[in-house]
Image: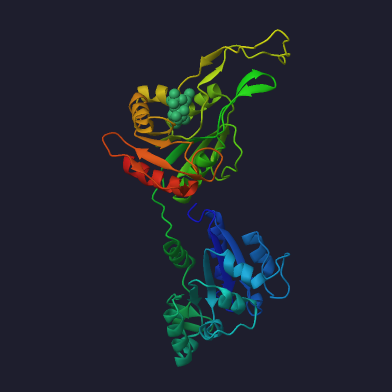
Amino acid sequence: MLFYKKKILVGITGGIAAYKVCFLVRSIKKQGGEVKTILTKAGERFVTKTTLETLSEEPVATDTFEPPSNEAILHIDLARWSDCFVIAPATANIIAKSANGIADDLLSTVILAHSGSIVFVPAMHTEMWENPATQRNIKLLRKMGHEVMPPGIGALARDKEGIGRMAESEEIESSIVNRLGLKEDLKGKRILISAGRTEEAIDPVRYISNRSSGKMGAALAEEALTRGAEVTIIAGIHNTQLPGEAAIIHTDTAQKMAAAVKKEVDKHDVLIMAAAVADYRPVNPVKSKIKKSKRGNLSIELEPTEDILGSLGKKKTNVVMVGFSVETDNVINNSRKKLSDKNLDLIILNNPLEPGAGFDVDTNIVTLIEKNKKPVKLPLLPKREVARHILDRVIHLI
Ligand code: CTP
């Protein structure tokens, strides 16, 4: 899932190499990316809108004045949407227009409206490539901070051999990977992540639970997927979108979560318990709704649930075990105690009383604690960034 949730905009101009871009679009999609395409009039002679629409699962943009949806300013919206903008094939014409700020159709207008660096993937006949005008335009583009991928030598339309062949899909992908700083350093690793909360029934309509939303677990899963891991999520109750690319096992109670984690753990290299598991459950959940009693207070007797990490830690295997520690007092010492009692490799402390940290927010403030190491406190960060730091540590522990 190298391109997981990355937004790639592809401009396609009129050249026979346009058919190769279909493979690029398919490949990025397969690896979790989102792709939008802009097709020029000449491009439409080589690939159809239907082909690109089917592969990208997005409407194809062709005309500045006829947006495919209700987007009011199509060229601006497209330019701002992308994490990476690629022009492939890039004809001598689009290179010339881009180098000189000409905007006379949708693609050239989006290029002019785009503020970042663009990847141009030239494809043309040798004579056009070698023409001093093209060479000057390429120099200009590079000077402006854009990347112009060198074309290959090989068969061209009507010519047996010459310079001007468009770079292959894999080369274009590696250029995108480099620009976006993507890495697949968890490829081949299997990561088990618990997310969300458990609910322990009092009666058929009431339960004991906590405020966990599942956002931290979801962010960890997304980050692990992006970095090439195979991810299984043991989901408790949650109110966030879990990545569909992960295998998801749904649970609701601490008991069911414990059973699912224990069943799965040995098939994985890493277990990250991000779920907020209830520590207690009612001893006797009542089968029918408890009626209000006029005689005063109601007591519910609670019994401890199984400490999932605690049980697994006792029979320590090769699985890297990561826990979370929710603490509001004596936070470092209490977390260190959990790290050692549960025999964990890493514990992530967060204090929900700190503004921006904890449950049901998109940010967190955490401290990473390992045995015999100085705790590392991270600043307030989006949960996805926190996930990146955690997995950076996990890699060293595998
Ligand atoms: N955990 C678990 N099984 C439980 C309770 C917690 O595996 N029954 C895991 C959590 O998923 C978390 C870690 O243990 O990764 C620590 O959870 P936390 O609630 O901070 O601590 P507890 O061990 O429950 O102790 P306390 O509530 O007293 O702080």
Nearest to the observer: residue 248 or residue 373: 373
Q: Residue at x 56, y 27 (%)?
A: 198
Report the front residue among 272 and 261. Answer: 272
The x and y percentages for residue 84 are 51, 66
Q: In which quarter of the image is residue 235?
A: top right
* Number of numbered discs on residues: 0
Quadrant location of ligand 1? top left
Return the residue nearer the eye: 264 or 280: 280
Residue 22: tell me if it is visible. no
Q: Can residue 45 be seen in this view?
A: yes
Return the x and y of residue 238 as percentages of the image width and height. Answer: 59, 36
* Residue at image point 55% right, 69% down: 20
Name the side, left or right, on which 325 lies relative to 67: left
Q: Is residue 107 left or right of residue 175?
A: right
- 134 vs 29: above or below: below
Which color scheme did the rendering employ for the protein? rainbow
Q: In which quarter of the image is residue 15?
A: bottom right
Q: In which quarter of the image is the C terminus?
A: top left
The picture places residue 331, in percent across and down from the top left corner, at 38, 32
Q: In which quarter of the image is residue 368?
A: top left
Q: Is residue 35 above or below residue 96?
A: above
Residue 110's x, y, as percent? 60, 74
